[in-house]
Image: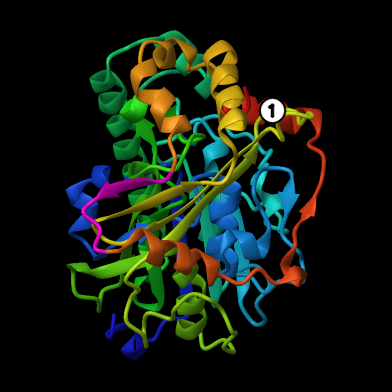
């Protein structure tokens, strides 16, 4: 991205469509900017967003799930000096037709939520971060919430999930384009770097699973990132991978903010990485003397594949899978695909794709990720209203 340092950029519009897979980004968007295959920091929204806004790996910022909270002392996109920063969460609106003011994610990110209309009056220089609907369930034209969608679709064929999912992504792109038009109407396109990315991917029947609360899989770890600006050449970058943790240092450089020592790369001055790490660690069941109730995986990916390492024991994973087969809204589909999801949950380290990395080099890569104590997050209990909203979105069983 050698072009970026020569562009006079005062603003950044960072749009994060929820649950958009790398392989489903419409060509209509991909061909309009610089496209990077991107390694998500995690496969769960609070984890990935925390990495995007701080430039830290999940073990460093400590946010694993809703209920965890970033340390307000950590530098992030929301507390930079001399730049107005806003966050809006339009996934909480039914395709922006029935607004719901409860953000859920704002407290995780140690910020506050602004109304989506504030893009029309935010003063420059600014950073505007938006979490959009993306491809998050419910897919297609379904009118209920995610829990109801999975329950009603039961054991529908994989092709139906994918078809309806692609409709959801297309609608998200239409909404994203309408946001770009707002910036154009204000005459800000020349001064604004626009970024479209996603927090994680989505399973559409692969490995007998749906959604994204599962073991790490390439269709969860790989997401698209597209950079847009009138002076940028439109191209696909294939000589490495972008990582969520690279976005923060890159934005800092573009806005001439004091440099910070971060694990990610400023890709205006450095080449993109050869590989990146993706994590998942979530409390799914109550802990007991036998299990701790956590589903935990670490993984490393290059452009062509990677390795996934389970961090929770097999007994733990078995109990969690059994709970999903009994109580999850996706249980009907999962029960019909036991020969796929049982090994997916219970196998040891797994290799995917045609990676050139060795399993030992991936383990070493994960071991080198520093885990400084001062970045521990604040863990808190969820309020009942928040739990209900998370259940509607399909995050809670």
- At x 65%, y 77%, the residue is 80
Sort mark 1 into few (<14), some (14-19) or many (20+) by Cα contacts within 10 Å: some
Question: Vertically, is 278 above or below 282?
Answer: below
| Residue 350 is inside the magenta segment | yes
Region in magenta: 349-356
State the SS at label 1.
Answer: loop
Q: Circle 1 sits on which residue?
A: 285
Which quadrant is the N terminus positioned in? bottom left
Question: Vertically, is 44 above or below 194?
Answer: above
> Observer-nearest residue: 95 or 280?
280
302 sits to left or right of 239: right
Q: Where is residue 173 in the image (x, y as percent from the top left)?
A: 32, 45
| Residue 369 is inside the magenta segment | no
198 sits to left or right of 91: left
Q: Quadrant of residue 370?
A: bottom right
Q: Where is residue 319 in the image (x, y as percent from the top left)?
A: 61, 23
Can residue 203 be seen at all in this image of the molecule? yes
> Observer-nearest residue: 330 or 179?
330
- At x 35%, y 51%, the residue is 222
Question: Vertically, is 87 above or below 21?
Answer: below
> Observer-nearest residue: 49 or 10?
49
Q: Where is residue 328 in the image (x, y as percent from the top left)?
A: 55, 17
């Amino acid at each position: 991205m050698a072009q970026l340092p020569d562009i006079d950029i005062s603003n950044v519009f960072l749009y994060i469509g929820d649950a958009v897979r790398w392989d489903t980004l419409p060509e209509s968007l991909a061909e309009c900017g610089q496209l990077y295959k991107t390694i998500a920091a995690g496969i769960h929204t609070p984890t990935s967003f925390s990495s995007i806004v701080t430039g830290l790996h999940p073990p460093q910022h400590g946010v694993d799930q809703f209920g965890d909270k970033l340390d307000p002392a950590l530098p992030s996109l929301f507390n930079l000096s001399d730049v107005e920063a806003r966050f809006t969460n339009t996934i909480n609106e039914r395709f922006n037709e029935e607004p719901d003011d409860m953000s859920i994610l704002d407290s995780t990110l140690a910020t506050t939520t602004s109304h989506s209309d504030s893009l029309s009056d935010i003063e420059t220089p600014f950073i505007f971060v938006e979490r959009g609907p993306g491809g998050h369930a419910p897919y297609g034209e379904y009118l209920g919430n995610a829990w109801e969608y999975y329950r009603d679709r039961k054991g529908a064929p994989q092709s139906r999930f994918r078809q309806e999912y692609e409709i959801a992504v297309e609608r998200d792109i239409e909404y994203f384009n309408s946001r770009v038009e707002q910036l154009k109407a204000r005459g800000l396109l020349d001064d604004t770097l626009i970024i479209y990315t996603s927090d994680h991917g989505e399973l559409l029947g692969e490995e007998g699973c749906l959604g994204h609360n599962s073991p790490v899989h390439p269709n969860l770890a790989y997401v698209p990132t597209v950079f847009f600006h009138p002076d940028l050449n439109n191209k696909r970058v294939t000589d490495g991978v972008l990582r969520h943790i690279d976005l923060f240092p890159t934005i800092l450089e573009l806005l001439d903010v004091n440099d910070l020592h971060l694990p990610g790369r400023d890709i205006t001055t450095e080449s993109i990485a050869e590989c990146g790490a993706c994590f998942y660690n979530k409390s799914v069941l109550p802990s007991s003397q036998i299990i701790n109730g956590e589903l935990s995986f670490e993984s490393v990916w290059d452009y062509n594949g990677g390795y996934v390492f389970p961090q929770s024991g097999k007994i733990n994973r078995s109990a969690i899978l059994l709970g999903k087969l009994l109580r999850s809204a996706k249980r009907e589909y999962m029960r019909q695909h036991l020969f796929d999801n049982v090994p997916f949950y219970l196998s040891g380290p797994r290799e995917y794709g045609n990676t050139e990395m060795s399993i030992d080099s991936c383990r070493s890569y994960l071991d080198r990720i520093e885990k400084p104590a001062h970045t521990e997050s604040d863990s808190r209990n969820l309020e009942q209203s928040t739990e209900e909203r998370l259940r509607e979105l399909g995050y809670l069983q």
